[in-house]
Image (tube, rainbow, N blue to C red):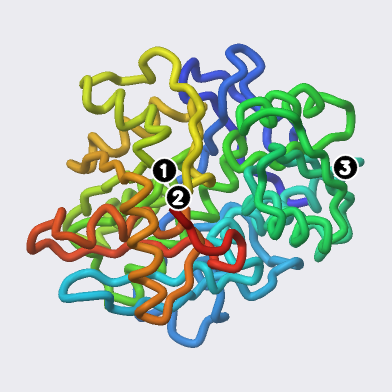
Amino acid sequence: MTSLPDCFCPVDGTRVPGGSLAWCCPVCRGPLDLDFAPTPAPLKSLTGRVNSLWRYAECLPLAAPSVSLGEGRTPLVPLRDGISAKLDFLMPTLSFKDRGAVLLAELALRLEPRRVLADSSGNAGTAIAAYCARASLPCTVYVPEDTSPKKLEQIEAHGARLRVVEGDREATARAAREDADEPGTFYASHVFNPYFLHGTKTYVHELWEDLGGRLPDVIVVPVGNGTLLLGAALAVAELYTAGLVDRRPALYAVQSAAVAPLAHAWSKGADDLIGVTPMAPTFAEGIAIPAPPRARQILRAVRDSGGTFLTVTEDQIRHAQADLASRGLYVESTGVACWAAVREGALGERSAVVPLCGAGLKTGLARA
């Protein structure tokens, strides 16, 4: 097996050897980062490469994929002057989570665990189930009891074992983590495992390529556990350090007003979460995370970029979903949050890209 880069804890610096099944810092039990600082290839060298996220091979911690489903290279289409949408709901499992899931499946193949375990509000679990099926890896997915039936159907269709947990998303995560230390278990956590972030960062590498070697003024991302935002921050740093962009775009993080622990901390100028955020019903179920484990990293990434946090109401989500559908884009209710946040002029004259992260067939229409 090719040697794998070590992981390390961003809080206390504890190192975990590459190739380990350890899923968190053994000291503080927090998420891990990857000791990996690649140099992206110049724009002109990408011509003729494979038409998937694997075209950015220099920036990926794993090479020579064996379970790819052609993920990545999703279309970029204009919504109005200065604002475009990246259609990540056109991924193989109909959500952006495929970007990270394929990296986790590739890593699991190299580690040869007895089983793969994941927890999710739906889309990440679906993606991991699909790529585990592609890799012939046994997979169990923990989901909260109020998960969309269509997402449950999709997970089971890929052959994963489904564990429905009584309670909310946090209860589901706790149940999965209790089982994650079982011998021979690969915890395919899109939150704790840093390989997932190195998959989601390809979203920004694609933007850079599609825009001819530049980035928009603002990159708007929905934030629950923050995997897309932190991946975006990684990619921006890689491109800037390599001299392939001359400025860093601002990161605008969008949360549902119903469950907005990060936006609340931001409004208070805090470096970490403040108090306890209760779970509340919201159409944006995929970003309703009361206590994201990477909260400090998310807040720092937004602050360092010169960005900010925006929140959206249930009415804004509903109207944005209907608006996108009227434009020919049927997107799930979580996936419209970014358009809901900026469609009425919050960005002024600045250019921006919003992700449409999941297909509308996963949840149906948000109804009052």
In this orientation, which residue lies closer to the viewer: 87 or 183? 87
Where, by quadrant of the figure, is residue 321 drawn?
A: bottom left
* Alpha carbon distance from label 1 to label 3: 29 Å
Residue type at mark 2? Leu
Residue 155 x, y percent position in the rendering:
77, 56
Mark linked to residue 223? 1
Q: Secondary structure at mark 2?
A: helix
In the rendered structure, are the residues bearing label 2 and label 1 in contact, judged by CB atoms less than 8 Å apart?
Answer: yes
Q: Position of residue 213 (x, y in %)?
A: 27, 72
Q: Secondary structure at mark 3?
A: strand
Q: Is residue 231 left or right of residue 344?
A: right
Q: Which residue is rendered at x = 56% and y = 30% of the image? A: 32
Marking on residue 115: 3
> Is residue 292 shown to the viewer in this render?
no
Q: Earlier in the sequence, mark 1 or mark 3?
A: 3
Please say whether residue 92 is visible from this viewpoint: yes
In x, y percent, where is residue 51?
A: 54, 81
Residue 228 marker: 2
Q: How many marks?
A: 3
The amino acid sitting under disc 3 is Arg
Q: CA distance from mark 2 to mark 1?
A: 8 Å
* Residue 146 appears left or right of 284: right
Residue placed at 52% from the left, 37% from the top?
Answer: 35
Residue 183 falls left or right of residue 118: right
Sequence-wise, which precedes: disc 2 or disc 1? 1
* Three-letter code for the amino acid on which mark 1 is drawn: Val
Q: From the top left corner, tell me how far across and down residue 88 is, in percent.
A: 49, 67
* Vertical placement of residue 127 versus 21, above or below: below
- Secondary structure of the residue carrying numbered label 1: loop
